[in-house]
Amino acid sequence: NSIQAFARASRAAAFVSSSTPENTKLSDSQMAEVVIAMLTKEDAGSTTSDTTRNKRPSSQHTALLNRGAYAAVALAANKAGRPGVSSLLLMLETSVKEKVPALIEIGAFADAAAVAVSVWDADLLFLTLTSFEKACLQSSSDANQGRIKFIDMIIHKFTPEAMNLLQSYYRSSNNSMASPGSTIDNETTLMNLLISSQKFIEAGSHKAISSFSKDKKKNRHERIPIIKEASRVFGLGKESVFQKVATDEYCELLVDQDRLRAQYNSPLVAPESSSVTYTILSILKHAASCESPNAVKKLYQDADRLAKKYRVPEKRLWYLKVRGLSESQQWSSLRVL
């Protein structure tokens, strides 16, 4: 049966590839009907009874016999300049592993992605995305313009699962270049994808988290511009106002911490990346190492100023003072608290 099915598929492919006058007069639907008849008819040499031969094969039996046949003939039709016939035949293909590559070959990338998603095949979906990306880059003389076209189509024409898979891929390889000849790396492409799809909270969060990567954590001066960029992204959406305010305040805290460390010439005061609470606590504890009453007073004032600026509740500030003064054994200051 498989040999007979292969023979039928070969005859059908030869038929759609031929440019006889009869073929050129057929419409796409008419030619597709002829091909379907060629693929589904019983083999003339079959050793079946007359009664069985006169019966049409069941749809399930035909589908099993012709797995991959419709895709093969569809590719032949596409090469012969009959894309309409190709699309009609691929609608009947039951083998997903044959159908998706065929849809990719004829340029129906969104349909290929939808088919891959319908059977939850991440490999076929990723194949579709990478093939579509390559096609977009090749269709444009500017690789960056091709990248923009690719992102726009992914957002508006593809399924949400395709976009989610693409995001996961870019997150896992955000330090590498997106494609040869492109000046846009994968991290930038991910940001463009999220912003273009108006996922401002997700885009801003990704940018803010990237400032904590190992290479950027060592250089605090490089982190602040990244956090400011995250704040700008949060500001693009109406639903991300809270995230923008929090990011702006964190950026101000980093600047204040730099100022305090430089002012007191001690890495123990306002440790880098510490919270507002721990920053205040470190200022109070540092007062224990100061001999001058004026210096101690100034530290206490800086702690109060920081608490007021970042709206630390009064009871919380009182707790911090009790903890900081007791842990640093500043008993005289603790008595007058």
Image (spheres, rainbow, N blue to C red):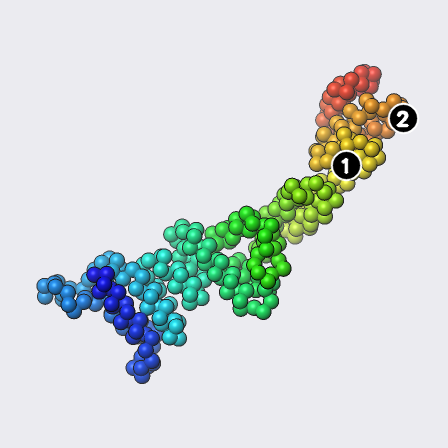
| Amino acid, disc 2 | Asn
- Quadrant of the snapshot with the C terminus: top right
Q: Position of residue 168 (x, y in %)?
A: 52, 48
Q: Position of residue 240 (x, y in %)?
A: 64, 46
Q: Looking at the rendering, which quadrant does residue 48 occupy?
A: bottom left
- Quadrant of the snapshot with the N terminus: bottom left
Q: Which mark is residue 270?
A: none
Q: Looking at the rendering, which quadrant does residue 57 occupy?
A: bottom left
| Amino acid, disc 1 | Gln
Q: Position of residue 226 (x, y in %)?
A: 69, 47
Residue depicted at 61% across the width and 46% down the height: 206
Between the C-alphas of marks 2 and 1, the distance is 21 Å
Q: Is residue 32 depicted above or below 225 in this figure? A: below
Q: Position of residue 278 (x, y in %)?
A: 72, 29
| Residue that protrudes farthest toward the front in the picture | 180
Q: Which residue carries the number 2 mark?
A: 294
Q: Which residue carries the number 1 mark?
A: 257
Q: Alpha-carbon neighbours of circle 1 within 10 Å: few (<14), some, or many (≥20)? A: many
- Seen from the viewer's position, the closer of residues 132 and 59 is 132
